[in-house]
Image (spheres, rainbow, N blue to C red):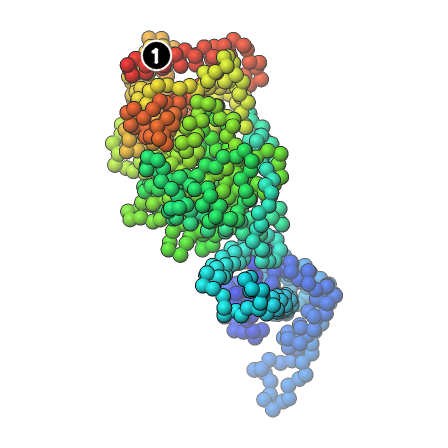
Amino acid sequence: MPAGIMIPATHMPSMMGRNGNVAAYGSSSGLSLGQPNMMDGQLHPLDMTQNTSESEIARLREDDFDSKSGSENHEGASGDDQDPNQRPKKKRYHRHTQHQIQEMEAFFKECPHPDDKQRKELSRELGLEPLQVKFWFQNKRTQMKTQHERHENTQLRSENEKLRTENLRYREALSNASCPNCGGPTAIGEMSFDEHHLRLENARLREEIDRISAIAAKYVGKPVVNYPLIPQVPTRPLDLGVGNFGAQPGLGGELFGASDLLRSINGPTEADKPMIIELAVAAMEELFRMAQMGEPLWLPSLDGTTTELSEDEYIRSFPRGIGPKPPGFKCEASRETAVVIMNHISLVEILMDVNQWSTVFSGIVSRAMTLEVLSTGVAGNYNGAFQVMTAEFQVPSPLVPTRESYFVRYCKQHADGTWAVVDVSLDNLRPSPVVRCRRRPSGCLIQEMPNGYSKVTWVEHVEVDDRGVHNIYKQLVNSGLAFGAKRWVATLDRQCERLASAMATNIPTVITSQEGRKSMLKLAERMVISFCAGVSASTAHTWTTLSGSGADDVRVMTRKSVDDPGRPPGIVLSAATSFWLPVPPKRVFDFLRDENSRSEWDILSNGGVVQEMAHIANGQDTGNCVSLLRVNSANSSQSNMLILQESCTDSTASFVIYAPVDVVAMNMVLNGGDPDYVALLPSGFAILPDGTTAHGGVIGEVGSGGSLLTVAFQILVDSVPTAKLSLGSVATVNNLIACTVDRIKAAVSCENA
């Protein structure tokens, strides 16, 4: 350490060396305490006070110093001045005073490894030689190391005795084993092939549990012990149904004005952590088998395009787990495979980072939070990482209740190089009055492919109470396109294309600045996240129905925006409605994203001509792009209005999201400025298939059924956050969204005719 710097004990790294070597007291002067190999194997000073009383420490210190460093304090001539025939004088030892001992003890607690300058200052203050101080600190560190090793040996002896006792108990049980068929004694060598195979499998799983438990031992807070396999226990429901997950970057901050009750959710107790680890390890094994097995576990659908899970075969194959299906719940299971343009390491990082995961899957994950990290993994990656999480899964419509889940996420790299990330619910560990969704082992397998691609196999397996789903969305939810594996994989594929496009430098665009292009894409990403987080039936929202009793009801809610640079301050009124259209989703998407047809539905453009100023493609489909539009209105007061728009589509959902932006702020973004300070109030459309064809069909197919369209607006009704909301403002927004819906219905119906 540099001379003159004292490091407090609370910031000192662990001083117990790997090899336990200690430099000799008479070692060469070429080694100093500043060198890393001088005194590697020393004990942290905090351990000293736990194992040895102060009186015993003082006695051991004095004895050690008298015997080992006293020779440095003798009087007499040096070796050069002595007569070789003269007998050497008897060495006179020096015993430190109580004051000297107390001062060095206090200094040792702050800095066990003083440098030359610190030793000289200490020796001058105490009236000692620098070598005396040096040897005292050496002896003190050695003393601490010896005491620590003695304590470790005692613990190891105790553990060894426990293992010996357990071994004897197992031997006795084996000697008294009886044959299940005849009741007579049996020999170990008589076990069947199946039993032998099961024993080997059990031993392998036990080794896996021991390894993972060892990784997480420091988080458990006590020695990790072997636990029996988790029995099937009655389900104790979990309800995370109120509040806000808090302001997380890119996600929770969008839910301004919502309750913060979910902040009070605590992580798992210390007693639950070993059980959580075992449950996650068993879930990983189940996921791996679910992703690879075929018939009879997975049966082909009637049209042969997908596979369906056989519940009876699943129960036979996986009898253990999180318990039986609760009464009234429905099983949803699906599996999907795709090749995506992203390397396997980046995919694992996205899945294990809650902020990245929430951003990439913003259309599915409305809120998410990591409650506790039980293990960060080993070898500098996420292999062996455990995280206890909460999340809320959504369909972009206020007519479909969100699904809340409390689960553990576990990441593992298998022997063949395949990475796997699995989730499994922890509802049994947390009592709650209501639970509406349980995640059985769900997740994905990621295999490395050439040229930076990855093969992803996704399994979604949940048990859910879906009685709150509106009738027009029931067929979509039942088809698996709303929450199933196909939607997760399609979203991941589209987002991987978007990320690849954002990093590419050879895509033609009118924006010449690479920094400006990235800033514009970042601003559009925030706009999409904000829209998706505010359009669903999340428990963080309180929707109020304005009129009617059918599916065309307009739902509104108010939120206050204060001290948020990404939003204009004041009272924001959000309005949303969902309805069915007898038009394929592809046609609805193309109509809404086309700037040439915008005047047919956009009332706020006042019939002005809409011109595309900039265009950034972010996917293979031409509909996946970010655009900057200008409205050339006859009204001079709106001549400075620009519209930022992102349109995106995949086989399960499409979005057209836009927001008015200030010209000055947009010029700053195009020049590479920070987009986080641009105020946005996004509005737009979510277009989903209605699920009438087998498993929803494909959005791009003509005649693939009707569409479910959600229209959502956000309007600043008052720039003063403390102002009262007037009924006139609500009526205006209600009329605005109703007129927009009527215009869209009329336009697409004429086009379809």
**What residue occupies the far front of the structure in this picture?**
182
Q: Position of residue 86 (x, y in %)?
A: 63, 89
State the residue at coordinates (47%, 54%): 378
Left or right: residue 559 compared with residue 68:
left
Question: Viewer-proximal residue, 333 or 738?
Answer: 333
State the residue at coordinates (32%, 23%): 584
Q: Position of residue 727 (x, y in %)?
A: 54, 10
State the residue at coordinates (42%, 19%): 579
Quadrant of res 600: top left
Q: Position of residue 160 (x, y in %)?
A: 61, 68
Q: Position of residue 700 (x, y in %)?
A: 30, 28
Graded by Cα atoms within 10 Å as few (under 14), some (14 to 19) or many (20 or more), the crowding at tag 1 reads: some
**What residue occupies the far bottom of the structure in this picture?**
85
Q: Where is mark 1, residue-wise?
A: 746
Looking at the image, can residue 186 be seen? yes
Left or right: residue 514 compared with residue 131:
left
Looking at the image, can residue 33 be seen? no
Q: Secondary structure at mark 1?
A: helix
- The quarter of the image holding the C terminus is top left
The amino acid sitting under disc 1 is Ala
In the displayed structure, 387 sits above or below 745; it is below
Question: Viewer-proximal residue, 633 or 646?
Answer: 646
Question: Viewer-proximal residue, 377 or 584?
Answer: 584
Question: Viewer-proximal residue, 614 or 216?
Answer: 216
Left or right: residue 493 compared with residue 220:
left
State the residue at coordinates (62%, 36%): 432
